[in-house]
Amino acid sequence: MESVKEQFQALDFAIFGAVFILSATVGILFGYKDRKSKSTDNYYFGGRKISPIPVAVSIAVSFVSAITVIGVPVEVYMFGTVFIWYNVSLLMTNAVALIYYIPVFHRLQLNSVYEYLELRFHPVLRKITSVMGMINTMFYLGLTVYIPSLALSAVTPMNLYLTIAITSATCTFYTTVGGMKAVIWTDVFQFLFMIVGTLSILIKGILVVGGFDIILSAAERGQRNNFLTLDPDPRIRSSAWSITFGFFFVTCYETVCNQIFIQRWLSCRTIRNSRIAVGVSIIPLILLSMISIASGIVMYAYYEGCDPLLSKNIYKIDQIMPRFAVDLFHDTPGMAGLFVAAAFCGTLSTVSSGVNALSSLLVMDFILPKFQNLTPKRKLIISKTASLFFGALVMLLAYLLSLSQSNVMQAVSSIVGFIGGPILGLFTMGIFMPWIDYKGSFGGLLLGLACTGWIGISAMVYSVVNSSALPLSTQACNITTLTNTTLDKVFTIYNTTLYTETTEKSSPSLFNVIYSISPFLYGVLGCTMTLVGAHVTSIFTGFSNPKNAKEKLFVPLIDNEILPEKMRIYFRFGVPLPQATKSGNNDIPHEEMKMLCTTEQKADMEIFKQTLEPE
């Protein structure tokens, strides 16, 4: 019998390789086109004049990694259609970004998203959160390269380590050579590959299974039609509430507090163009999400009586989607390669965006503040060198993850999961709570990190099982023997969460309840505790007077010029109204705003240093 790997033919390799060749070519083209430009603004922001439509596609594709293309169908296969509520969280996040965050960041024209925290609170906080964000991004990019490579290596002739090297090298090359323009335009054609590849799987699967009626019947029998799971218990891993609000906080962090996406907002010329880009990006985002969710249900109907994991045709559940593609298209050369190309397009887009963002953070937050007299040419050389460095580092992390055991993987997943909530809390209090100063923000950050870290690490140590994985079957498998198998190292990859069925260790009952909280809610917990910690700290250190706040750093919850002045000030929590001008262009230049904020910060620097010194 022909092995699964032997079914991957020459045409499949050609289609898969075309993605990498085209990506590298786009990088070369933009590198040649901008060869005379020595501006880091052009390298990181595309000159801040890119059309909103390609930016919208780039936002969507950067958000949808190969972990999503492979992991969301697995999520639905294992836990049912309740994951459809994820789309509601996307809509909520886009609304928040459109109304509140885009005006602030565009008004200030920041080079680094964490520069806002320096303007609002303190330079030290900018450095701390920038390091946290870089660690978060690096580990996530390592997972983004490793997990799809691991999954696809089992069903294709491609070696795991070679795949990691090719993927990392290609992303690093066209990102370093072409900058933001190359990243955005490669995202556009990679999106086309992703749509065609994922749609081909869905349509072929529906035809092979036998139509919608058979698929829906299988979903009912397997308890997968559970999208109305409305139990508010936070210990339930997958419910409408945990997914909607849990992913709302996660996607808020990934969207409004992440250098990857802020660079895209600021690559548009105006606030209006940025809003168009973010608004349009929801269309491809939800389209890809719904295709992946539908593919998960179709995949369950296909394997309803013979789960590939329990029948030992695969050894990790994240390999089921590429296995499904090969099973469907074993007699159609090129189609399996198209799906593999679609999955790796997600990886290429996410990793290239991440490498560019990491380079930007290193240069803008750490190098340029120390060496302000660098020439434009030297700045560009440093920027490209930083891109090479982070590309190599991501590849190294992917290699290290390939040598790790499942507990290390879960530790990495937890790091990625619980850093975002506290950072989101900082930006939330910065934009909406003018009475919180830098002392309160530090106290809130410490409490937020302590709580999420404590619960996340303790849940791993005690191996608390909060999974609600639905039943799988091998009754229709054509095998003679089947050993009792536990779902060991069963990954549910989306948002880097992990499901492992194992023996629960003894732990205090109260703590057991706390540690059983759904991992989707770590972001909610981190953000909430950061806000609570900031207010508790401010009770002892004192609250700021909103009347003295810099109005350009805040956004009111509700504001319109037709409202009475007192009502507008009420919704601004006392922050003064901006000085209106006839032209409406009343923004304080970024450097002037930074100077105004830094003057007050320097006045408090000695006091701040004393608070950091032990008694």
Image (cartoon, rainbow, N blue to C red):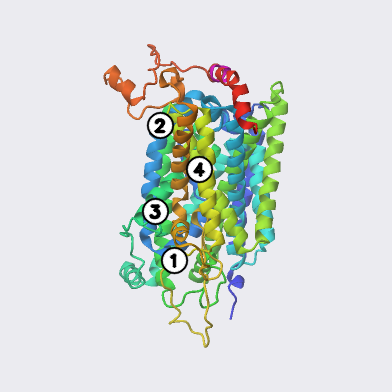
Q: Please report contact status of discs 2 and 4: CB closer than 8 Å, yes or no.
A: no
Whether residue 548 is visible here, answered yes or no, is yes
Q: Mark 3 — residue?
A: 242
Please report contact status of discs 2 and 3: CB closer than 8 Å, yes or no: no
Gap between marks 2 and 4 measured at Cα: 23 Å
**Which residue is the site of mark 4?**
448
In the rendered structure, which segment of residues is drawn in magenta?
594-599
Hey, what amino acid is under mark 1? Met
The CA distance from mark 1 to mark 2 is 36 Å
Name the residue at 45% across, 31% down. Answer: 539
Which one is earlier in the sequence, the residue at label 1 or at label 2? 1
Instruction: Write down the residue under mark 1.
Output: 78
Task: Please determine whether, in this image, residue 211 is positioned above or below residue 574.
Answer: below
- Residue 274 appears left or right of 181: left
Foreground: 482 or 27?
482
- Say whether residue 598 is magenta: yes
